[in-house]
Image: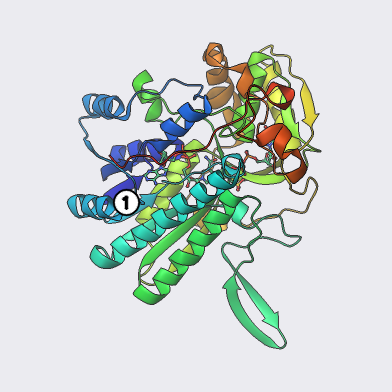
Amino acid sequence: MKALVIGGDGYCGWATALHLSNQGYEVGILDNLSRRYWDTKLGVDTLTPIAPIQKRLQRWQELTGKTIDLFIGDITDYDFLSKSLRQFEPTTIVHFGEQRSAPYSMIDREHAVFTQVNNVVGTLNILYAMKEDFPDCHLVKLGTMGEYGTPNIDIEEGYIEIEHNGRKDTLPYPKQPGSFYHLSKVHDSHNIHFACKIWGLRATDLNQGIVYGVKTEETAMDELLINRLDYDGVFGTALNRFCIQAAIGHPLTVYGKGGQTRGLLDIRDTVRCMKLAIDNPAEPGQFRVFNQFTELFSVGDLALKVKKAAAKMDLEVKIDNLPNPRVELEEHYFNAKNTKLLDLGLKPHLLDESLLDSLLNFATKYQNRVDKQQILPTVSWHRQQKEEVTSPTNNGTGKNGSIPVSSPEPVAAN
Ligand code: NAD
Ligand code: USQ
């Protein structure tokens, strides 16, 4: 089995690449390192100090004797992608290589366009490269639970049976995404579904929930293998942010009423899900969708859980309900199915068991690296607040002391 992990220098991709390598797969990483560059442009950094990718891979080889091939370049560059695939000859392509922050995609027009071009063109290039040279390869693509939005009915895994005017059909589940980033994932899903239909490609779309935690068996082996942990207002996700806020005594930043409910999973389950999807591939022509999360929580519940766990470390935690910078329902029905990966054998790690060990411990250990200026949200979905909060043309600090962001620039392929 040869798995090429696109986006393998990122949070989910790095943990997955090491896990697959440890499990005996021949692994390659393809990444343009753009995420490190976007952080630099925004003036933000991961809480945990991550080594250059070459050093990470060298350390992995020293520790385990296993080599991971490295392809540095951009999947929107078709020639580079195609050459890399021909050289590596994957049986599975695991695709994490996208701009994945909803706030980043909502900064302004440039960031929205960049996100959609980067994600949609990158995925489309992969589909064409597979059709040309690797039609039997299995594409395991990271989608997101946010593709579905928050409908007032149960969320199925990709498809829903509908009866309309006396006729029945099984159709793709309706999509109501909440940011230009989440929309890019919907566009990807449609393109992949279509390519499977017309070219007989095989693909699994993993609609993943919010990932938390920093530790996997492999990344915990050595300090040089440590994974990234984002806490800033653009790339940091809710639970990871709350734990770091708790560690430095910052009030937890619950947006609005905090009734927004989402699927979540431990990064140790992300890597297991990837292996399960790879080991049980889709059939030729099949576009399969799994909902990849283990538990559902509201943002308010998450804050309370962090407060309770932090108390065991004698950390006093306050919870703030900030004005919501996003346009989203703050109280809603949410009941999503997630049985397909459980049926394949996933044994979930539960949040109550992971909070201290995989999050709060790291948050306190690296708390001196926290830049407090990066905690508050800097990007707003609301049109009327644009000048106040998000405009990259603002000079100096914005509302609440937040720092305005600047536009992305194209990243060189090599
Ligand atoms: P990340 O930003 O840490 O990693 C993404 C990696 O992809 C980075 O290393 C980046 O340099 C690379 N990349 C981006 N565009 C590229 C391009 N055009 N060519 C080559 N490499 C490129 O993100 P992550 O948190 O690891 O997320 C990975 C995937 O999982 C994304 O598709 C995201 O949508 C999905 N996902 C993440 C979460 C989460 O909570 N982190 C939840 C659900 C789904
Ligand atoms: N939120 C807060 N306070 C914060 C940060 C977020 O209340 O400090 C709220 C948001 O308003 C939102 C919820 O928490 O209601 C989730 O926000 P998030 O930033 O944790 O997650 P999201 O923007 O949805 O994006 C993340 C990843 C993305 C992935 C998605 C999975 O960045 O790549 O696709 O989670 S899901 O949410 O299931 O769509």
Q: Quadrant of the C terminus?
A: top left
User: Is 310 on the left-hand or right-hand side of 170?
Assistant: right
Q: Residues within 10 Å of mark 1 (few under 14, many from 20)?
A: some
* Image quadrant assignment for residue 101: top right
Label tally: 1
Where residue 269 appears, as percent x and y from the top left, is 49, 41
Horizontal side of residue 399 vs 219, given as left or right: right
- Residue at 53% in and 31% down: 213
Q: Nearer the viewer, residue 178 or 383?
A: 383
Q: Is residue 250 visible?
A: yes
In the picture, residue 122 is in which quadrant?
Answer: bottom left
Please give the name of the residue rendered at 80% of the width and 30% of the height, measured from the top-left corner.
321
Camera-side residue of 326 and 392: 392
Check the image and report above or below for 37 versus 284: above
- What secondary structure is found at the residue carrying circle 1? loop
Determine which residue is flagged by label 1.
77
